[in-house]
């Protein structure tokens, strides 16, 4: 199949590059997307900092009510999943396609486990009436209301990003299955790996903010 040609003012011809092969463009575009995501979480981190400054003691007490063991286990899971996703990308570049696909599947499975543990943790809090808008929480100290409001919003938003990550990994597996990702064309897989690194980094900040300030 012949490439479409473009010509400059001197009449010199250049092959037109399909957007699917625009490695630099896809990489730059994804970094811009991650920048917007970082700005969104950055605003929430700033908000947490302001309220923590105003209600330091109550925030520390409220943090002690969270289950640091469940949060810690989830931290380890995300650390391991970041490693397996990065290794999957490396295996693909080394033409170890089957191994790469298995590692992506393992990463997605660990992400599901992360959500399951977070769901258990949330259900415990909700069972005790600790959730935004509950009658029990509404009569508590303002600092505690703010702490748990931020906790549910920020961990919930992070959980939504985990769900998106799982969907992206499933998409990667389909692309691998049908040849859309191959050793010489891995930009999609690199971007998904980068996205998962971002999700992991956000949790690395969330964990000490919510679980460790009361230790």
Image (cartoon, rainbow, N blue to C red):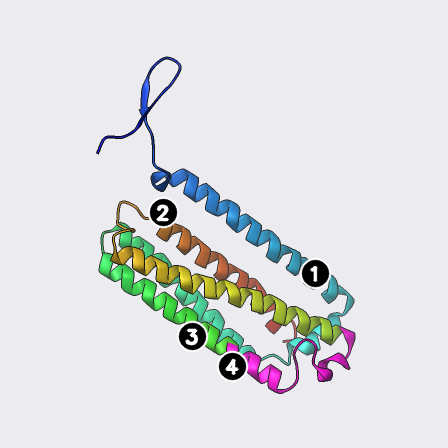
Residue at disc 4, secondary structure? helix
Q: Are marks 2 and 1 in contact (CB under 8 Å)?
A: no
Q: Which residue is mark 2?
A: 187
Residue at disc 3, secondary structure = helix
Give the labeled residue for mark 4: 120
User: In terms of image quadrants, where is residue 178?
Assistant: bottom left
Q: Earlier in the sequence, mark 1 or mark 3?
A: 1
Q: In the rendered image of this protein, does residue 181 appear above or below residue 146?
A: above
Disc 3 packing (10 Å; few <14; some 14–19; many ≥20): some
Which circle's residue, 1 or 4, is located before the other in the chain?
1
Vertical order, 133 against 170 (above or below): below
Distance between the alpha carbons at the discs numbered 2 and 1? 35 Å
Camera sees residue 169 = yes
Magenta-colored span: 119-142
Residue underneath mark 1: 47
The residue under label 3 is: 113
Residue 126 on the magenta span: yes
User: x and y percent of residue 66 in the render?
Assistant: 61, 79
Q: Position of residue 193 (x, y in %)?
A: 40, 55
Mark 2 falls on what kind of element?
helix
Give the CA separation, mark 2 to mark 3: 27 Å
Quote the CA–CA distance across marks 4 and 3: 11 Å
Q: Residue at x 23, y 60 (%)?
A: 98
Inspect the magenta stretch and tell me whether residue 21 lies in it.
Answer: no
Mark 2 or mark 1, which is nearer to you?
2
Left or right of 208? Residue 114 is: left
């Amino acid at each position: 199949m012949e490439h479409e040609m473009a010509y400059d003012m001197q009449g010199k011809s250049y092959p037109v590059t399909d957007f699917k092969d625009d490695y630099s463009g896809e990489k730059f575009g994804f970094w811009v997307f991650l920048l917007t995501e970082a700005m969104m979480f950055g605003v929430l981190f700033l908000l947490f900092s302001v309220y923590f400054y105003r209600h330091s003691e109550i925030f520390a007490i409220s943090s002690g009510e969270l289950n640091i063991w469940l949060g810690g286990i989830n931290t380890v899971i995300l650390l391991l999943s970041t490693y397996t996703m990065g290794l999957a990308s490396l295996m693909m570049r080394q033409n170890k396609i089957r191994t790469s696909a298995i590692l992506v599947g393992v990463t997605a499975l660990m992400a599901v486990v992360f959500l399951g543990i977070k769901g258990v943790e949330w259900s415990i809090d909700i069972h005790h009436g600790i959730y935004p808008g509950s009658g029990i929480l509404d009569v508590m100290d303002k600092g505690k209301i703010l702490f748990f409001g931020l906790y549910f919003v920020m961990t919930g938003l992070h959980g939504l990003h985990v769900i998106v990550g799982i969907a992206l990994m499933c998409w990667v597996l389909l692309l691998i299955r049908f040849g859309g990702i191959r050793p010489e064309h891995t930009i999609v897989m690199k971007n998904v790996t980068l996205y998962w690194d971002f999700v992991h980094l956000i949790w690395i900040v969330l964990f000490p903010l919510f679980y460790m300030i009361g230790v």
